[in-house]
């Protein structure tokens, strides 16, 4: 198994991007440069959105993986599997306005 810099990049890029954006918020919020409230709100929403994406992508991948395993291997009629199937079906339906 060969490790190179390209395979390790996605694991490191997410947290470093959050730290970089947070650093920009503090730099541009200093009194010398001056940042207005709307620009600060855009930066904060970008950092919060990126952080929530980095957290939720593993949860969504886990639920969809459990659904894939349960669809090919019968693991019983436990309420956990019923819930996993319902959540995965909901995630896999196309988003429609008002839904």
Image (tube, rainbow, N blue to C red):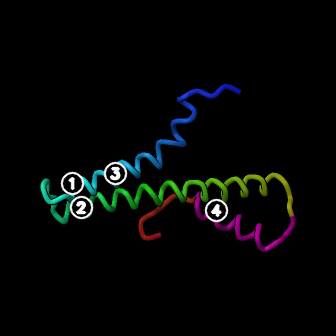
87 drawn magenta = yes
Displayed quadrant of residue 49? bottom left
Q: Marks 1 and 2: in contact by CB < 8 Å?
A: yes
Please tell me which of labels 4 and 2 falls first in the chain.
2
**Badge 4 is on which residue?**
89
Give the answer, above or below, for where 61 lies relative to 80. above
Relative horizontal placement of residue 70, taking residue 4 as reference (left or right): right
Q: Is mark 4 on a helix, strand or loop?
A: helix
Relative horizontal placement of residue 4, taking residue 72 as reference (left or right): left
Please tell me which of labels 3 and 1 falls first in the chain.
3
Question: What is the spatial separation of the Cα atoms under label 4 and label 1, in whole angstroms?
Answer: 44 Å
**Badge 3 is on which residue?**
21
The magenta stretch is 76-92
**Magenta region's main secondary structure?**
helix
Residue depth check, mark 4 versus mark 2: number of the one nearer the observer: 2
Q: What element carries label 3?
A: helix
**Residue 55 on image: x %, y %:** 53, 58
Question: What is the spatial separation of the Cα atoms under label 3 and label 1, in whole angstroms?
Answer: 11 Å
39 drawn magenta = no
Displayed quadrant of residue 51? bottom left
**Badge 2 is on which residue?**
40
**Residue 69 on image: x %, y %:** 77, 53
Please tell me which of labels 4 and 1 falls first in the chain.
1
The residue shown at (47%, 69%) is 99
Q: Is mark 2 on a helix, strand or loop?
A: helix
**Badge 1 is on which residue?**
28
Please tell me which of labels 4 and 3 falls first in the chain.
3
Q: Marks 2 and 4: in contact by CB < 8 Å?
A: no
Residue depth check, mark 4 versus mark 1: number of the one nearer the observer: 1
The residue shown at (52%, 40%) is 10
Q: Residue furthest bottom?
A: 79
């Amino acid at each position: 198994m060969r490790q190179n810099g390209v395979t390790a990049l996605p694991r490191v890029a997410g947290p470093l991007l959050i730290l970089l954006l947070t650093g920009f918020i503090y730099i541009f919020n200093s009194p010398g440069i001056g940042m207005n409230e709307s620009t600060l709100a855009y930066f904060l929403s970008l950092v919060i959105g990126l952080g929530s994406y980095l957290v939720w992508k593993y949860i969504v991948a886990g639920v969809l993986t459990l659904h894939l395993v349960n669809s090919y291997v019968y693991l019983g009629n436990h309420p956990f599997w019923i819930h996993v199937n319902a959540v995965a079906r909901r995630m896999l339906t196309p988003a429609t306005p008002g839904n």
